[in-house]
Image: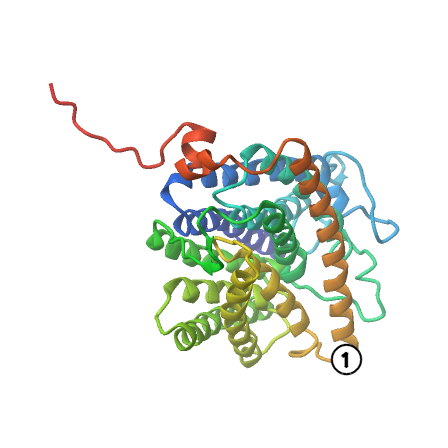
Amino acid sequence: MELLTINNVWMMICTALVFFMHLGFAFLEIGLTRQKNTINILFKNIFIITIGLLLYYIVGFNLMYPGEFNGFIGFAGFGLDAPLTEGTLDLAYNQGYTYWTDFLFQGMFAATAATIVSGAVAERMKIGPFMIFTILYVGFIYPIAGSWKWGGGFLQTLDTPFYDFAGSTLVHSVGGWAALVAVCLLGSRIGKFKEGKIQAIPGHNIPLATAGVLILWLGWFGFNGGSVLSADPAATSLTLTTTCLAAAAGGVVAALVSTLKFKNLDLTMFLNGILGGLVGITAGADQMSPTDAIIIGAIAGAIIVFAVSLIDRLKLDDPVGAIAVHLVCGIWGTLAVGIFGNLAGGAQFLSQLIGVASYAGICLVSSFLIIFVLKKTIGIRVSEKEELEGLDAHEHRMDAYPDFRLNEH
């Protein structure tokens, strides 16, 4: 009982840390975008976590963990039904945590996928269609996709099971694939590409973006540390060490490569390099040595610089670098499990490829169908006037930074 209590407390602390990541995402997104769209981005982020938890209670948890099912889709019923013993909570549910802690921890992950999309479509997507997309993607697509591995589905039953410790693919690339589709269907912001040339649209508050990244790094202690699913001292301490080393290596290498490539010390590349390292290590954080983690993070940091440049050259407008960070580094981190660490080998690498391809399939198809239908029916993009004047004024009729002046009489 004492061990269960210790494990459960650790899992609840990790749940709180993952919840705190939503503040980090919000800060990062508003910092890297323009002042006139701040309320819009904050509204979306608050909507995502609130509706995400409610949807995960109603259908998500039992879609993701349906029990016995065909390996592709199953459903254990609406709402939650905690296991009871003589009218009280069954503490034998799991050695590491209770049923309720399990639900809350997994629910925090569910909302992250839509948050990734929020940053990529910032400054030009209508709030209504985005909310509809979030409901469908977080409520149904994410948990069905999650069941394929974490719910005991077909990827878990491969001869060499697909491995994704904390979600490089199951969380980050699920959001990243949808972000890619959304950006393609939405188009770039006005002024981003002029006469074939890429135009920088600076964020309005880089200090806030920096705070967001540091909050996300802290939150990753819960994201990866909690994925141990207990307070096991050896596993949690190694996981937190590999997580931090990968983040540090990602940041340093992204800053170095960016400086060599663009001849300036770009703080935003430094910040996204840290995030790329974090996403990259997430699939195998418990399986890597510290040296492996540094290599994985360093490669992720280099990938960030070239991925951001490639996305720009393809005329895709991603204001916060979400596709490079969460999709490209998510794929890299997932494949790295078959190259480095305890699971390295040809069979594991093949399973990782199968997993990446499977999630690409469901995410590309489902997000395209949802967003394309919304585009053809109610429309997904604000008018040119609304975009130029800001979504805060037109979608919300509010100002994030009102100019207070003393009235003179």
Residue 58, x across and y down, in percent? 70, 34
Please tell me which residue is depicted at 55% across the width and 57% down the height of the picture: 315
Please tell me which residue is depicted at 59% across the width and 45% down the height of the picture: 186
Nearer to us in this view, 48 or 117: 117
Q: Is residue 350 visible?
A: yes
Q: Amino acid at mark 1?
A: Gly
Residue under label 1: 346
Q: Is residue 90 visible?
A: no
Left or right: 320, with 86 as reference point: left
Vertical arrangement, residue 299 with respect to residue 267, above or below = below
Could you tell me which secondary element the residue under label 1 belongs to? helix
Residue 24, x across and y down, in percent? 45, 51
Nearer to us in this view, 400 or 210: 400
Vertical arrangement, residue 332 with respect to residue 92, above or below = below
Please tell me which residue is depicted at 75% across the width and 42% down the height of the picture: 62
Q: Quadrant of residue 57?
A: top right
Nearer to us in this view, 375 or 234: 375
Question: Quadrant location of the C terminus?
Answer: top left
Nearer to us in this view, 178 or 79: 178
Q: Residue furthest left?
A: 409
